[in-house]
Image (cartoon, rainbow, N blue to C red):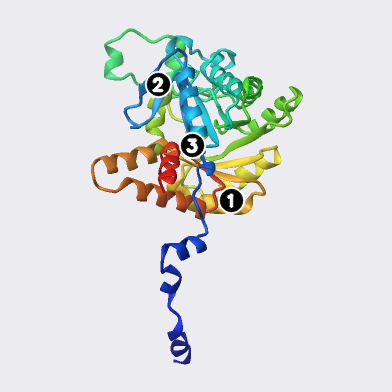
Amino acid sequence: METMAHSGHIRMRRLRRGELLRDLLAHSLLTPARFVLPMFVRRGENIRQPILSMPGQFQLSPDQALEDLSELAGAGLKAFLLFGVVDAADKDDTGSYAHNPDNAVCTTLRLVRDARLDILAITDLCYCEYTSHGHCGVLTPRGPAPDKPHAPTRRQHRTKSPAPADAALQRNDLTVDNDATVERLGQQAVLHAQAGADILAPSGMMDHATAAIRRALDDAGFQDRAILSYAVKYASGFYGPFRDAAESPPRFGDRRGYQMDFRRSAKEAVREALLDVQEGADMVMVKPALAYLDVLSRVAEAVPVPCAVYQVSGEYAMLKAAADAGWIEEKPCVLETMHAFFRAGAAFVITYYAAQIAQWLREG
């Protein structure tokens, strides 16, 4: 009773009276410099192709990307993340076009560098956009074929027999060759660094990719380039619109053999992140974002480096769809989720809303 009586003078609402007081005491404050904008670039000129499943986002040719980035840098945005979109004719089984110095990513990097924009260039390192099969690296046989015969579908009964490679794809007998892929990721990283990338971000969840990339960068004289590892990337249903945007859906199977299982404890996420830090990652990332705030919090507390979070395409698309339907008010809901990410420990947020957030913050 004494405790209850004594607490009568406590009024929690005192610290919520007035906007100035609330701002003074806020733990997370939003600024454009803490957001990274993902961008999709493809070969060509004057291309600004809308991505239907991601309203407000586009596939851009390098010249159009430069135009947008020039404007965004002036608005206070400090970083962007590049993904390449590749014509079907340029794709093959090993993703060799990723090593072409004139691909869209490298061309965009050179344009940004030559324009001397005050903005950080981050590039995604992976092969899913560049391979004809849509997986994140070089394929290798999974193991001995199962004893039971492969039952053809009704559609297959009506068509000619597939070629041996296609049959292997249909049986899901192939998987990504981890060690062959990480060596190629090192080559891709050096190519991007030569073109002007400041930060290299391996996203394929290949074991020891960070070590291979760090070694390749150092050997090529790029000791000053940072690695942002997709250390904690789950096999998520929220990636659907991205696969439309990057034109990179897997032609067979899925990516659960190398991306993380969301049914596992956050302890696995912490272990993944710490392993990448040991191998030379300067920053780590948790992806997706909103459904993984518990993981973000655990990882951010455990690692001795900055921890980012990626609000992925499906999360963006859901907010856009609900706002377009009039079910939610877009701006307050978006900003509320951003505060949630920072409250959970994010050092910065990768989001397709980055440009819009910069505009909202500019407008006050």
Residue 159 image position (x, y, % from top left): 30, 9
Q: Check disc 3 and report its element: helix, strand or loop.
A: loop
Residue 217 in which image quadrant: top right
Is label 2 or label 1 in front? 1
Identified by mark 2, the residue type is: Pro
235 and 144: which is toward the camera: 235
Which amino acid is tagged 3? Ala
The N terminus - image quarter: bottom left
The tag on residue 300 is 1
Q: CA distance from mark 2 to mark 1?
A: 48 Å
For the residue pair 55 and 160, the one nearer the viewer reads as 55
Extreme residue in the bottom direction:
2
Name the disc covering residue 75, or none: 3
Name above or below for residue 142 compared with residue 323.
above
Residue 220 x, y percent position in the rendering: 74, 22
Residue carrying label 2: 149
What number of labels is visible? 3
Q: Nearer the viewer, mark 2 or mark 3?
A: 3
Q: Residue at x 35, y 21 (%)?
A: 151
Q: Secondary structure at mark 1?
A: helix
**Picture quadrant where residue 177 is located:** top right
Image coords of residue 121 (percent x, y):
58, 29
